[in-house]
Image (tube, helix red, strand yellow):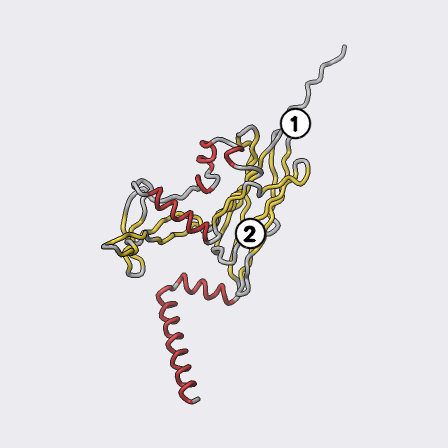
Amino acid sequence: MPVAIAPPSQAPVAISATLTETDVRVTSGFTGAKISVYGAVFDPRGRPSDVVVVVRGPEQSVRIARKVRIAGIWLNSRPVVFEGAPGFYRAASTRPLADITRFTQLRTLGLGLDHLTIAAPAERRVETRYGVRDMVVSSLGADYHAWRGAVVRLKQTAGLYSADADGVTFLDRGLFRAQVDLPADAPIGQYSARVILFQDGLPVSERTLPLKVEKVGLERALYLFAHQHPWLYGLVSAFIALAAGWLASRVFRRS
């Protein structure tokens, strides 16, 4: 008597990805770097897929001021500090994000500059940094979105924030590639590259890849010294500047 054999269970949809470079070394001659993300989509049914790649740099504080007009004169307002903003952000996708998934998904996943997650504190407070009192922007404040928009625009102008609706290209069936351009002034620290697979408007698989940008050699020693001992670094820099000025005056006086 023949026995019926059940078909094998359908393999789950998955995505795999890798970076061509996971450790970017910054020297005095660093002019930027190009990093490629390669990956593959595994789907036995071969359904249409979209891929979104988000590279996010280390969080840092951004100090900004607003132009205000007082008695006909434009002056800078009291500086504020926006905490939790990534130092670098790039979103690349196979097509416009709004065509890939719904608004709620974009907001939940923090995809795109309009939905970029910036973890500003809920409370409003004043902090003193190096003798200067700064107002820290609150995520619950009435002007939060205005300050957030200013931060995004400043970062875009500096080439540190960007979004590319054609940044991910399928090379062959299931194989894709995306390129991330790191500018020369990309912040130092730990980055992450999120690779998300969408099908029918829903995220079905995701991979997170680590990326590190670090200074090496003398640049690294100076960087660590400046960040670990800022006051001493400032005094040493001032002393070197005074010594250089004194030496230059002596040389030109003799000539």
Task: Give the labeled residue for mark 2.
Answer: 181
Front residue of 215/111: it is 111
Kind of element beneath mark 1: loop
Task: Give the labeled residue for mark 1.
Answer: 45
Quarter of the figure that contains the N terminus: top right
Dividing the picture into quadrants, the one containing residue 170 is: top right
Q: Residue furthest front?
A: 72
At a point 29% along the width and 59% down the height, the residue shown is 132
Quarter of the figure that contains the C terminus: bottom left
- Mark 2 Cα-neighbour bin, 10 Å: few <14, some 14–19, many ≥20: some
Q: Residue furthest right?
A: 1
At a point 50% along the width and 49% down the height, the residue shown is 191
- Mark 1 Cα-neighbour bin, 10 Å: few <14, some 14–19, many ≥20: few
Asked if residue 16 lies left or right of residue 223, the reply is right
At a point 41% along the width and 61% down the height, the residue shown is 227
Residue type, mark 1 in image: Arg
